Amino acid sequence: MLTLTENAATAVTHLAQRMSTDTGGLRIAQAAAPHEGYAVSLADGPQQGDTVVEDGGARVFVDAVSTVELGDRVLDAHVDDDGGVGFALAQRS
């Protein structure tokens, strides 16, 4: 199952706090076009079939196809000086 670094959990929690719901989180799904990776967006809650990954109050919803592909990955995050958040996936060691 996808795991989160402490940085990713903190970033997801802060992003979700901007939403008007307590059930929100970050959603990772297949991109619309093949071979474009993943689409990352804020979501009010999981969609049917999503796997919910919770860590330190952070909630990440992963669609069914991506759940299989990301099962051995770690989600990390970097916050730049302007407050922008970038996410990266790494192989779990």
Image: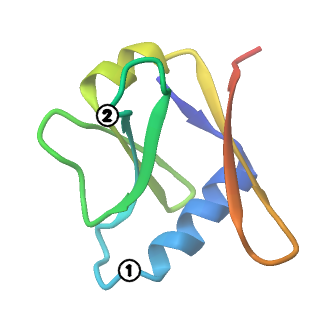
Cα distance, mark 2 to mark 1?
24 Å
Q: Which mark is residue 88?
A: none
Q: In front of the other: label 2 or label 1?
A: 2
Relative placement, left or right, of 12 versus 23 is right
Q: Nearer the viewer, residue 18 or 32?
A: 32
Q: In this image, 87 relative to 50: left or right?
A: right
Q: Secondary structure at mark 1?
A: loop
Q: Residues within 10 Å of mark 1 (few under 14, many from 20)?
A: some
Residue at numbered disc 2: 32
> Residue 18 location in percent, x, y?
46, 83
Image location of residue 72, percent across then percent down? 57, 15
Read off the residue under disc 1: 19
Using the image, determine if residue 29 lies above or below residue 17: above
Residue in the image at 38% along x and 33% along y: 31
Residue at 35% across, 27% down: 33
Left or right of 76 on screen, residue 24: left
What is the x, y in percent for residue 21?
28, 79
Viewer-nearest residue: 70 or 83: 83
Report if the CB atoms under discs 2 and 1 are less than 8 Å apart: no
Q: Identify the amino acid type marked 2.
A: Ala
The answer to which image quadrant residue 83 occupies is bottom right
Q: Residue at x 83, y 66 (%)?
A: 80
**Quadrant location, the C terminus:** top right
Q: Amino acid at mark 1?
A: Met
Identify the secondary structure beneath mark 2: loop
Instruction: Give neighbour class at mark 2: few <14, some 14-19, many 20+ (Cα, 10 Å).
Output: few
